[in-house]
Image (cartoon, rainbow, N blue to C red):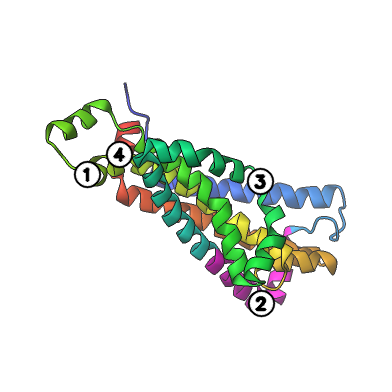
Amino acid sequence: MASKAELPRSSKIGLPIVGTVVAIGLWWLVTIVFNIRTFFLPAPPDVVDAFSREPNYLFQESWATLWVTLVGFGAAALTGTLGAILLTGSRLVEQATLPMIVAFNAVPKVSLVPLLIVWVDYGPKMRISLVVLIAFFPILVSTMAGLTSTPADLSELTRSLSASRLKTYLKVRLPWALPQLFVGLKVGITLALIGAVVAEIQSPNGGLGSIISVSGQSADTSLAFAAIALLAMLGVSLFYLVVAAERLAVPWARQISA
């Protein structure tokens, strides 16, 4: 089967920029054509003006959101990967615990915020806990899918070589599961940022989510949009950092899927 044609590097960088510029232009055009008040939908210049008014404040709160996101995501990645190894290592453990994990994941995480406040109090601990709860499940499921998809011929090869269970995991199953693991990580990093913002909106005492919440109450829509724009840039940057890590860790995966 022929491999897909690779886009030139300039196109990979230029096309997203062009798409972003066009989207901003359409947004600006809509506000002009329909004469939309800034209170309802600020135009791009209004958002830039809001950012220029409070740059230090916005960057400081961006760092607060980023820190919570990264710490929570790291904890979710670690626990999700270890959980997947434990569940796939024992069929009995998987059958006994997976239904409970699925049931817990079905619970809206926002509903747990009041309980988290009681358990760990306000502040970073509550936010990090919510990030972990939101990002954990996709990492767990994707890693499990990778660990259980090892080809039968590789499994037979490890048995014929009398490889131990630990060596089989380290040398065969985990490397084979890495592409699926990174699928979960790419979903997880986006959900981690969402979880951080949800926690900040529910408990507005720091972070970009708190800016959005407080700006809404004070009718400063332009400042809220400036915070949203920073969140969008954070989300894109974090996602592509995970993509870059994937290309470094499993460069052979692209060749297989091409």
- Residue type (three-letter) at the residue carrying disc 1: Lys
Whether tag 2 and tag 1 are in contact, CB under 8 A, the answer is no
Q: Is residue 226 visible?
A: no
User: Which mark is in front, 3 or 1?
Assistant: 3
Q: Which numbered marker is on residue 171?
A: 1
Which region shows up in magenta?
Answer: 44-68
Residue lying furthest bottom? 56
Task: Judge from the rendering whether residue 69 lies leftward or rightward of residue 86; answer left or right.
Answer: right
Q: Which residue is mark 3?
A: 107
- The percent position of residue 70, horizontal first and vertical second, equals 50, 63
CA gap, disc 3 to disc 2? 34 Å
Give yes or no for residue 54 being in the magenta stretch: yes
Q: Which residue is mark 2?
A: 57
Q: Point out the tag, 4 or 1, that comes first from the N-terminus.
A: 1
CA gap, disc 4 to disc 1? 9 Å
- Residue type (three-letter) at the residue carrying disc 2: Tyr
CA gap, disc 4 to disc 3? 31 Å
* Residue under the point 40% across and 50% down: 81
CA gap, disc 3 to disc 1? 36 Å
Q: Could you say whether the residue bearing mark 4 is in a helix, strand or loop?
A: helix
* Residue under the point 28% across and 29% down: 151
CA gap, disc 4 to disc 2? 45 Å
Query: Up-down: is 246 above or below 147?
Result: below
Give yes or no for residue 40 being in the magenta stretch: no
Q: Could you say whether the residue bearing mark 3 is in a helix, strand or loop?
A: loop
Image quarter in which the C terminus is found: top left
Q: Which residue is mark 4?
A: 176
Q: Could you say whether the residue bearing mark 2 is in a helix, strand or loop?
A: helix
- Residue type (three-letter) at the residue carrying disc 3: Val
